[in-house]
Image: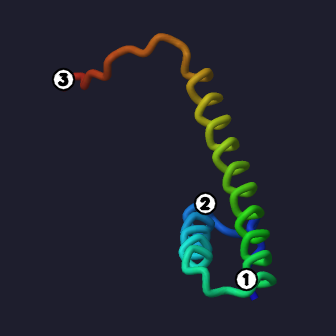
């Protein structure tokens, strides 16, 4: 049985989406099977979009936390 979309990594979701698209493009699937694959694809896209939004929020938070002026790194001579 396939994992739930929320349990897949972003990369796994993307890979599965590519497989689904390739399979559907071949056109050799029944309507019922095509609908099931389409539904799976939609769920994968939604979960992937959520993961991307969460990553974007984390990056934004990190950038805002480090908004203080940064000084160049120097090594003290001993």
Instruction: Name the residue located 69 percent from the left edge and 49 percent from the top edge.
Output: 49
Question: Mark 3 and 2 residues: CB-CB less than 8 Å, in contact?
Answer: no
Q: Residues within 10 Å of mark 1 (few under 14, many from 20)?
A: few
Q: Nearer the viewer, residue 46 or 58?
A: 46
Q: Is residue 77 left or right of residue 56?
A: left
Q: Secondary structure at mark 3?
A: loop
Instruction: Name the residue located 77 percent from the left edge and 63 percent from the top edge.
Output: 43
- The disc at residue 21 is none
Q: Position of residue 65 (x, y in %)?
A: 61, 23
Instruction: Name the residue located 63 percent from the left edge and 43 percent from the top edge.
Output: 55
- The disc at residue 10 is 2
Q: Secondary structure at mark 1?
A: loop
Q: CA distance from mark 3 to mark 2?
A: 45 Å
- The disc at residue 2 is 1
Instruction: Name the residue located 43 percent from the left edge and 15 percent from the top edge.
Output: 70
Counting residues from the start of the chain, the first of labels 3 and 2 encountered is: 2
Counting residues from the start of the chain, the first of labels 1 and 2 encountered is: 1
């Amino acid at each position: 049985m396939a994992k739930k979309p929320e349990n897949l990594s972003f990369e796994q979701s993307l890979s599965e989406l590519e497989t689904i698209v390739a399979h559907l493009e071949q056109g050799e699937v029944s309507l019922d099977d095509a609908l099931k694959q389409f539904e799976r694809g939609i769920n994968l896209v939604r979960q992937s979009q959520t993961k991307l939004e969460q990553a974007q929020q984390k990056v934004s938070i990190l950038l805002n936390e480090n908004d203080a002026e940064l000084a160049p790194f120097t090594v003290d001579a001993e």
